Amino acid sequence: MANLGSGRNAFEDLARLMGGPRSKDAAKITMHVFSVDDNPAFGATVSGDLTKWRSWLGPALRKFMRERGLPEMTARFDYVHFSPTCSPFSILKQTGVSGERHLEEGVWLVLLGMALVLELNPRVYTLESSWRGKQTLRTLPLMEPLASAMHRLSLCSFHPCDYHKFGTWWTNVPRTVWTDRMPRECSERNLCLHKLWTFHHRRVMENGQGPEAAAFPETLCRLLVEVAMATIRWHLVGDD
């Protein structure tokens, strides 16, 4: 899979677990994660500018495949996830709390990132951005063609995450597969486990900064991989 721009998440940890010891009867599934982020602290496969992917993609992919002893890649990526930075669309930027907004730069990043997703030609893709705000990504005209592929998730629904943050998700996963496997969003009628036990969220985070704010819960990463695999199995017979 490819993990584009989402920082320090649990996809790499899942790949290590999936490659660990198994019983002889267990299905052998190996997961390799090609990650990209402009922050070197996250230790991505490529620490570089996502908007300049045409200059580094080919050499980086060949190195990635060679280091893992994989054959020259001729097939499609199974799963690509893309999380463009949320700060240009932040509600804090809209209110002037955290400085000047750069909406045009944010849109440019999204367009070039989506072009990279198309170049990687995945069987399954997910795209994630913040939900709240008058000019968040979901409200912009460029996302209108993907309106039918849009979902809303609350991070606190993925135990043990205990902070409340809504995210917008777009995916080509069939809606029935997505809704059957993803938990319902946290609401007064459907409380997450943390609020059910403690009657509150530890904190509410919208457009937060820092590693904890950026990272997805491990349970969410695991479900994303499971949903991608279920979708691939569903389509595989007639796909190629």
Image: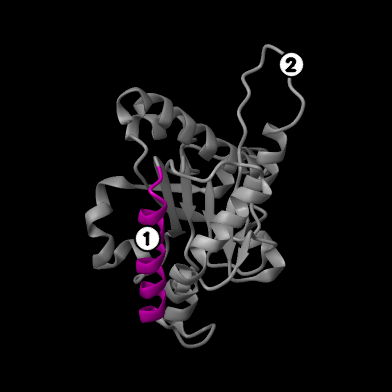
Check residue 144 for magenta coloring: no
- The percent position of residue 142, horizontal first and vertical second, equals 26, 65
Figure check: 145 above or below 185: below
Sequence-first disc among 2 and 1: 2
Q: Secondary structure at mark 1?
A: helix
Q: Is residue 26 left or right of residue 90?
A: right
Cα distance between the residues tagged 2 and 1: 39 Å
Q: Which residue is mark 1?
A: 114
Q: Residue at x 68, y 50 (%)?
A: 67
The amino acid sitting under disc 1 is: Met
Res 239 seen here: yes
The amino acid sitting under disc 2 is: Ser
Q: Secondary structure at mark 2?
A: loop
Q: Which residue is mark 2?
A: 23
Q: Residues within 10 Å of mark 1 (few under 14, many from 20)?
A: some
Highlighted range, magenta? 103-122
